Amino acid sequence: MAASRHRRPRLSRRLKLAAAAATALATGATVSVAMADESAKLCDAYATVTMGKYYVNNNLWGQDKATGSQCMWSNSQSGDTISWATEYDWANNSAGHDYDVKSYVSSVLGWHWGWKVDKSATGLPTRVGDKKDIRSTWKFGLNADPGTMNVAYDLWFHAKDNADWQDGPTDEVMIWLNRQGGAGPLGTKEASVSLGGATWDLYKGNVGWNVYSFVRTANTTSATLDLDDFNQALVARGLMSGDKYLSGIEAGTEVFKGKGKLSTDAYSVNVG
């Protein structure tokens, strides 16, 4: 069966991630280091490293469906631009789970089942209808055979401007820059759109909240985007309300299976 049928079983994710986030905060599993290197790998599930207004989260939310491991580490920070990397090896998937996501190790700006960094530093939340620029640059590298995976933004939306750890999203927007090994998005194709100098296939699914995936038709390892263009494309099609609030912006890799490494050479996002 195609990978697009199995992208991620999110219905159980809300309580799982909220509990994991609360545990991480309670146990102090955060390393507040702006500069490190590969020798300072963090391999525990949900370990985080704070990098200015962002933090990088070793989000291994689907690890129980496979055997393997994944680690991440920070490299450098200069102003709002950060560099970090993650290395993974996921194999021996449980029966029927080859195309379930095992992890989404990612940088986080703003809400991720709660707030970890001072909210005032993030520029979030912001009302979609206010049409604020959300400028992002991302340059990254992959090994030659990274398995079945994608490199994508993940944007979270709420109906209110004060969402906390217990508040599930109403909408989620993923922006896939690169996909390998047959990885595919949730849902069914709605349209093809031109944004940010590229063509994207737009998919819509639902897992208790709406999930919209913009999948770039040609892979890239470098992008400079106004992420709000994607939000406004959904509003223009009547798929999202301008009264929703963008609460969180993440950028990382969803891994289904395989062995590989994502190196984020330079990443930044600025709201407004």
Image: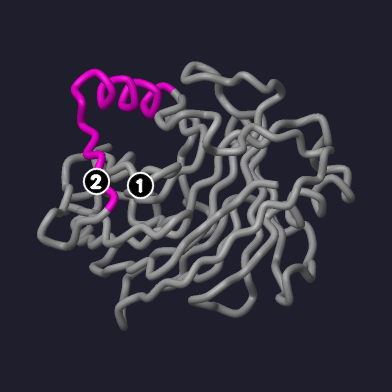
State whether residue 162 appears in this view.
yes
Label drawn at residue 33 = 2
Residue at 55 percent across and 30 percent down: it is 120
Q: Relative to 256, say whether 53 is above or below.
A: above
Residue positioned most to the bottom: 144
Residue at 38 percent across and 66 percent down: it is 264
Pinpoint residue 172: horizontal percent, then vertical percent.
62, 41
Magenta segment includes 25 = yes
Magenta segment includes 272 = no
Colour setting:
one colour
Mark 1 and mark 2 residues within 8 Å of each other at the beta carbon? yes
Q: Amino acid at mark 1?
A: Met
- Image-quadrant location for residue 44: top left
Give left or right: position of 208 versus 57. Answer: right
User: In this orientation, which residue lies closer to the viewer: 267 or 176?
Assistant: 267
Write the start and end of the magenta stretch as one range.
Answer: 15-34
Give left or right: position of 148 versus 10. Answer: left
According to the picture, the residue beneath numbered tag 1 turns out to be 51
Element class at badge 1: strand
Give left or right: position of 146 versus 41. Answer: right
What's the distance in space between the residues labelled 1 and 2, CA to CA? 7 Å
Q: Amino acid at mark 2?
A: Val
- Label 2 crowd bin: few (<14), some (14–19), many (20+), radius 10 Å: some
- Label 1 crowd bin: few (<14), some (14–19), many (20+), radius 10 Å: many
State whether residue 59 appears in this view.
no
Q: Relative to 159, say whether 220 is above or below.
A: below
Q: Does label 1 or label 2 sit earlier along the sequence?
A: 2
Residue positioned most to the front: 79
Element class at badge 2: loop
Q: Main secondary structure of the magenta part?
A: helix
